[in-house]
Amino acid sequence: MGTNDVKENRSEKKLGNRFSLFFAVLGLYLLLSFLVRISFLFRSFNELVFTPGHIFRAFVMGFLFDLTAGLCFLGLYALYLLLFPKWWIGSILDKAFTYFYFAIVLFIIYFSLIAEYPFWNEFGVRFNFIAVDYLIYTEEVVSNINQSYPMPLIFAVLFLLIAGTFFFLSKFRIFRHAFSSKMKIGKRAFYSVPALLITFLLLFFLKNEQANFSNNLVTNELGKNGTFSFFAAFRSNELNYNQFYPKINDREAYSVLKNDLLQNNQTYVSNQWDNILRNTKGGNEIRPNIILVTIESFSADFLKAFGNTKNLTPFYDSIANQSIFFTDLYATGTRTIRGMEALTLSVPPTPGNSIVRRPNNHHLHSIATILKQKGYQMDFIYGGDGYFDNMNNFFSGQGFDIVDRNRRNILSDNLETHRYNIPDKDVTFENAWGVCDEDLYTQSLKYADISSKRGKPFFQFLMTTSNHRPFTFPAGKIEQKEGTRDAAVRYTDYALQNFIEQAKTKPWFDNTVFVVVADHCAGSAGVWEINIDQHHIPAIIYNLHQPPQRIDRLTSQIDLMPTLFGYLNWNYQSEFYGKDINQTKPGDERAFVGNYRTLGLLKENIFTQVDDRREVKQFNVGPDGKTTGLAGEPNKELSTETISYYQTASERFKEGKMKERH
């Protein structure tokens, strides 16, 4: 060993080493996380089932989750210490990076730990999908936080904590150790490699569900880490119904559900208590081509029929009078993937994220199940990148071929389907969300021609994008200038008219039914309460070769496709929660409405709402769909019916009961 190496070793023994800062901040995070866990223990002591063995296990599990989160915060720094050479150590750039990195890390650490307190106070749990939900409704949540908490004071405290931490790290010469220890790469690897390996192993083997070993909620949540739980919820896209929502006995729930689902033309195939498979009796079947046009953010109040005087949708208004026109239809949710879920799966909106975005959502009982049995070619046609919101994966998993603007060749693992790019030569206008509606309809016509030449009936699920911010579209098409919602709605209607007129020139038009419906309303987004009137959407079934008809009965978005199958006289087996409105007994009409956390059922003039605090509330709803206040005496029958629908739907997806039967 040379003289310099001896001096270096003596210096490290005296001052510490390059990794002192890494271990100091990791130790600080572990200590603070332990103190947070202790505080939650005492804060929720009355709800705790005090079993010493379980408490010990919760703290051991908690330490492992804390260690994993702490190592993730510091993983980049461990890699940085390993890769940068001795001559870099202590340089101005080294110091600048280190101070900046730890300022960011400490801000995230302190902010996440502080944020856990109000979350625990409200829900009694660590971060879950409710916290993830805050990322989805950023504008509303930021406004709510500003009104609820003194944000300037909180940020001031955060900056003082960071400054105080830097002061104590400097006082104990931690920064000096980090900038003066000239460690060789072999010795740096001695610290970095194990740290990175342990991080990888913990991330691979640790699952948030492993903390749920007890029957007591507080014990389980004590064993978790807020940051780890947040990202686990982000990956799973689910809010556990059993844990957060009101429940009844499973057998009672299915009994109520099966009694309510049965239509006049249906019989159950089995007496098994949780089997909802039903034979649906039709008649002389017709199998026309079907084009389902799902229009982005298309509220009912854009139409003349619902009082709009701006003449935004003259074409839709005109063909509604020639169609089966649903005037009292309600969207299940507030996002496109909720509308897709409702129209394809015909199920209520289970809590958390849409099934479209969840894992294990292939080969579900859906409209595709019926269409495949009837011999249809199925295409999902989207003007944007279908990788967004997991749309391509979901639709290919049900057996659809994909047509989208995805240029990255990210394919589904479902080898039974195909994916086709929208070529540049077919695009006349494009914004961040995708091609304009006219270009989308061009793809529909193209693939309809292909399917028609093959002599096979086709079903197309079209998803438009033009009626979405930034509200841009090709110039010179309409009088209004782009950039406003009204202009986008007018262009949407113009493009639809152009599409139908072009379709009329095709040999397959006379044998093609068009279903035109919204995915959700333009102003339906909201976290805390549900506004029924902001879920009111229009729908038409056009070119059915039947006399025009207005369906003024209350209808849910999940009822639309079963109702279409009824008009086509189809015989099939159904596990849908949606019903053919024409086969539904008077008084049994209902609509499902949800917004991630809050779920509800609208029936007659009462909206029954269940939420993630296990509360059931009922509201009076006026003829205009507006909530007029809390209902008086609770209707227990409606409460039970509401819980039965959502409880069973959640259980069926979670336990794999929604999978297709073979």
Image (cartoon, rainbow, N blue to C red):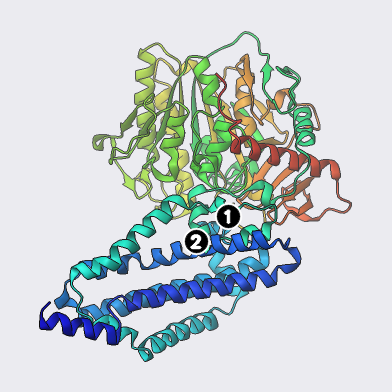
Q: Quadrant of the N terminus?
A: bottom left
Q: Secondary structure at mark 1?
A: helix
Relative image position of residue 51 (x, y in whole percent): 71, 61
Q: Is residue 344 above or below residue 181?
A: above
Q: Report the front residue among 307 and 388.
A: 388
Is residue 616 among what the camera can see? yes
Q: Residue furthest top?
A: 284
Relative image position of residue 553 (x, y in whole percent): 73, 33
* Residue that carries the numbered disc 2 in the rendered image: 65
Q: Quadrant of residue 15?
A: bottom left
Q: Quadrant of residue 116?
A: bottom right
Q: Quadrant of the C terminus?
A: top right
Q: Earlier in the sequence, mark 1 or mark 2?
A: 2
Q: Secondary structure at mark 2?
A: helix
Q: Is residue 119 above or below residue 637?
A: below
Q: Are marks 1 and 2 in contact (CB under 8 Å)?
A: yes
Q: Is residue 567 above or below residue 527?
A: above
**Residue drawn at x 68%, y 16% as measured from the top left:** 279
**Residue drawn at x 37%, y 59% as measured from the top left:** 198
Q: Is residue 620 left or right of residue 172?
A: right
- Specify the amino acid type for callout 1: Ala
Q: Report the front residue among 71 and 139.
A: 71
Dot 1, how many residues are within 10 Å of its Cα: few (below 14), some (14-19), or many (20+)? many
Q: Is residue 334 left or right of residue 403?
A: right
Q: Report the front residue among 65 and 603.
A: 65
- Specify the amino acid type for callout 2: Phe
* Residue that carries the numbered disc 1 in the rendered image: 211
